[in-house]
Image: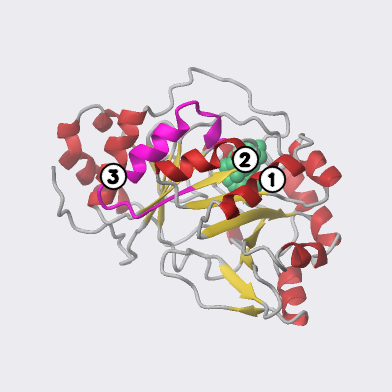
Amino acid sequence: MALDAAPATDTFGRRFHYLRLSVTEVCNFSCTYCLPDGWKKSGPLSFLTVDEIRRLVAGFSNLGLSKVRLTGGEPTVRKDFNDIVGTVAASPGVAKVAVTTNGWNLARHVSDWRASGLSHINVSIDSIDPEVFRQITGHDKLNQVLTGLDMALSEGFSAVKVNAVLLRQTAEAGFDGWARFVRDRPVTVRFIELMKTTDNHDYFAAHHVKAQGLRDWLDNNGWTAGPRAVDAGPALEYRHPDHAGSIGLIAPYSPGFCDSCNRLRVTSRGKLRLCLFGDGGVDLRDLLQDDDDCDLLNARIVSGLTGKSWGHQLAQGLSGDLKNLAQLGG
Ligand code: SAM
Ligand code: SF4
C-alpha cells in the first residue's frame, strides 16, 4: 500500500484536503428545490459498500485528503451508517469525519455516531418557522430536528453547523429570527445560495435570490466577516459580539467562488466528480474491489485531477449535468 503518494493537486496548483462522499441517493425528505416529488427508485440500489468505502477513503487519504464529509441523498437512512462513520474515522490520515444530514434521526443516533468517530455535523434547516419548514421539506419535523441539533451540541461536537438554502420566501421574511437563533447557540448558520440543476430551472427562476441582500443585512446589523480556516472552503463567516453563534454565506454565483476550491466529490456509485457544476466523472469502482489495487486507485485519481477545470461556468448559464443535489450531496 503506497502511504507516501504525492499530495493531490490539480493543474492550477490547488491542493485537495477534503473529500465529499455521497453514500446514497435515497432520501426521506422532499425538499422543494431538490426532490420536490420525493426520491423515486430508478435502477438497482448499488451504492458503495462499507468495504468499498474503506478502500476509497484509504486511496484519498494517501493523497493527502484529511477531511471526509458523508452526504447523500440522506446519508443517515443507510442502516449501516454507523459502520461507515467508524470505518472512515479509522482510516489512517483522516482527521475529521463530517456528515451533512437533514437531521431526522439525529436525536436518536448522534451519541453513537460520536462514539464511532464523527467529529463535525451540518444539519440542514431552511426555516425555523415550523410551517415554512414543513412546506419546504414535506415533513412536520422541525422540532425533532432542533432537538437533535441541541443534543449534538450537548454531546460536545466542536463544530455544529446549520445549512439553510437562501430562498426568496425565507429571505423576504428577514434574518432577525436567525440572529436570535444563534444568540445563545454556538452554531454557525450558513446560508447557501440556491443552485440551478437540470431538474429545477423553473423553481430556480422563481426562488433564487442573490446573496447580496444577506450581506447588506449583516453589514447593517453589526456582523463582521472573519478569516477563513484552511479547510473551510468557500464559506465566508460573520461574527457579532453579542452572539455565541455565527452566520455564514456560501455564494457560488459570486466571483472568486472557485479560487480556493479544496474539495473532491465521489458519488454513491463510486465516480470521482471534479466539480459540482461539471459533467460526468471518473469511475473508480472497479478499483475498490481489492486492497491490492490501492496504487492503481491513486494513479487513476491523480490522472483524473488533470481534467479539473479552474472554475464553474455558471455565469455563462452552464450548470452541468446534475439533475438534483441529492445525486451528489452538494
Ligand atoms: N440530505 C442531506 C441534507 O439535506 O442535509 C444531505 C444532502 S443535501 C443534497 C446537502 C445540502 O445541499 C443540503 O444542505 C441542501 O439544503 C443543499 N441543497 C440541495 N439542493 C440544493 C440546491 N439546489 N441549491 C442549494 N443547496 C441545495
Ligand atoms: Fe433530501 Fe437533502 Fe435533498 Fe432535502 S436537500 S430532499 S433532505 S437530499
The residue carrying mark 1 is 147
**Counting residues from the N terminus, which is met first, the one under dot 3 or under dot 1?**
3
Q: How many marks?
A: 3
Task: Tell which of 237 and 193 is nearer to you.
Answer: 237
Q: Which amino acid does label 3 sit on?
A: Ser
Looking at the image, which residue is at 71% across and 43% down?
33
In x, y percent, where is residue 199?
66, 38
Look at the image and tell me in which quarter the N terminus lies: top left
The image quadrant that residue 167 belongs to is bottom right
Tag in front: 2 or 3? 2
Mark 3 vs ligand 1: CB below 8 Å: no
**Counting residues from the N terminus, which is met first, the one under dot 2 or under dot 3?**
3
User: What element does badge 2 sit on?
Assistant: helix
Looking at the image, which residue is at 46% across and 33% down?
81
**Counting residues from the N terminus, which is met first, the one under dot 1 or under dot 2?**
2
Cα distance, mark 2 to mark 3? 26 Å
Cα distance, mark 1 to mark 2? 6 Å
Q: Is residue 151 magenta?
A: no
In x, y percent, where is residue 150?
65, 51
Residue 314 placement, left or right of 291? right
The residue carrying mark 3 is 91
User: What element does badge 3 sit on?
Assistant: loop
